[in-house]
Amino acid sequence: MNRPTAALNLTAGAVRVGRSAQARPRQVDFRRLRLRLYCLIILMDAVSLLAAFVVADFARFGSVHGYGLTTFAILFPTYVAIGLNGDSLSIESLRRPRHSAAAATRALLLAIAVATILFFSLKVGAQFSRLVFGSGSCLSLLLLAGGRILVGRSIGEHYGWTFRREVLLCDGVRIRAAGTEIVVHAAKDGLEPDSDDPAMLDRLARVLDGAERAIVGCPPERREAWARMLGGANVDVEILTPELDSIGALGLRRYGEVPTLLVGRGPLGLRDRALKRAFDLGFSAASLVLLSPVLLAAAAAIKIDSPGPVLFRQVRMGRGNRLFEVLKLRTMRIDSADPHGTRSVSRDDARVTRIGRLLRASSIDELPQLINVLKGEMSIVGPRPHALGTRAGDRLLWVIDERYWDRHAIKPGLTGLAQVRGLRGETVRKSDLTDRLKADLEYLDGWHIGRDLAIIARTFGVLVHPNAF
């Protein structure tokens, strides 16, 4: 960014303007780029939905009778309206194709629900086929999700996954760019947080030209000056405060006129809690009924294989750091039981019975925790509860990382984000905990029912896992 200097006459005297006054190469207008890409995505969504309902129409009647077109004409505008109010068309949807597919699927499911109510409440008959609507809806979900991922990856690779101009301003500190930010070194570009110097303000404005976000890294004593300097820069400005990471700061709020740091999150909102609890009750009750033959067969096998009770109870920590008894099918010999969990089960562990090894490998031993879900002690999806004596290496989990307690802001789950990412089994190294903790805290950030459904779907792919022993 070394540019020749130029002069700018402001008043009676001449004020020297820095290198940024030189004509800059034309910058990409990312706002217009995103708008064009959003239009492309909407067009691809329209093609996916139209193709799905036309195919369903043809499959039902052997020719296109217009039922699919009528359904599309009603469903697609509803889907677009819901999507525009959600996050299916956002920078995140461009940067993360899987996120885009999940968000679009949620919007389409809601649109299908609205259309269903509309069709049946208005008693639409002549222009509507229930079979075309049902089969077309299922096909449209598949085409929409697949199209979003394929198109999203193509767009991302074409534009280098850069959809917004961001500037990382380094002043006296060394920072490594986390993504595609443009790194500007204040000393090299002659930038100082001096709001009394119009020429300095002009140089800074040219550096930030076209940017939508500026991240400033500087010593603590210069933060206030940079904040004043960039207050009118017409970009989102953030100042790095790495020391706040040690206390686990999650955000900034206010108490009256005084700013406060958010260091812990309370429970979900009332609506989200009601939705999650209703889902937990319905899913766990139905699962217990459907899986009762499996549970009975497993119980009989345990009794035949070794003496002792069928169920194993262990105290673990739940939401709000409250203790509860988790239920599992017994997989160890009764004389080798470890009620405090001080020793994790290892591969080929001699304490595990023959039937227990099979139950653990298939995750069937966890099924009694559906009862914990019914009792309200656990949820279907959430951070897995750990035994009180669980260690990573020779250290207790919460000693390794104090953020460990943050995961107890929500009920523990039968499955979770860490599990579907393959983070299960022994905790031998520090990273075995920190990787799982990172996934747990990610799950807590911005909960929605769609994420739970996606995790449940992915769980079926990891029921049998190399680390399940």
Image (cartoon, rainbow, N blue to C red):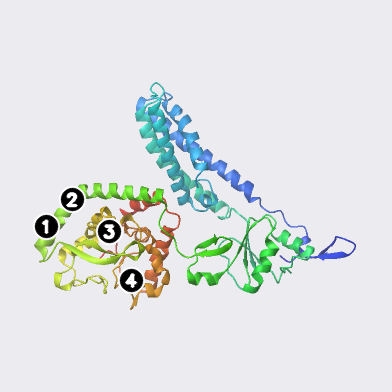
Residue at image mark 4:
427
Q: Secondary structure at mark 2?
A: helix
Q: How much space separates mark 4 and mark 1, taking CA atoms?
A: 31 Å
Residue at image mark 1:
300
- Which quarter shows the C terminus? bottom left
Residue at image mark 2:
292
Q: Residue at x 51, y 43 (%)?
A: 85
Q: How much space separates mark 3 and mark 1, taking CA atoms?
A: 22 Å
- Asked whether the viewer can see residue 164, the reply is yes
> 452 or 19, which lies in front?
452
Q: Does residue 446 lie above or below 391 as drawn?
A: above
> 350 or 63, which lies in front?
350
> 267 or 402, which lies in front?
267
Q: Residue furthest right?
A: 12
Mark closest to the chain's N terminus, 2 or 1: 2
Q: Residue at x 48, y 35 (%)?
A: 78
> 344 or 324, which lies in front?
324
Q: Amino acid at mark 4?
A: Thr
Mark closest to the chain's N terminus, 3 or 4: 4
- Asked whether the viewer can see residue 55, the reply is no
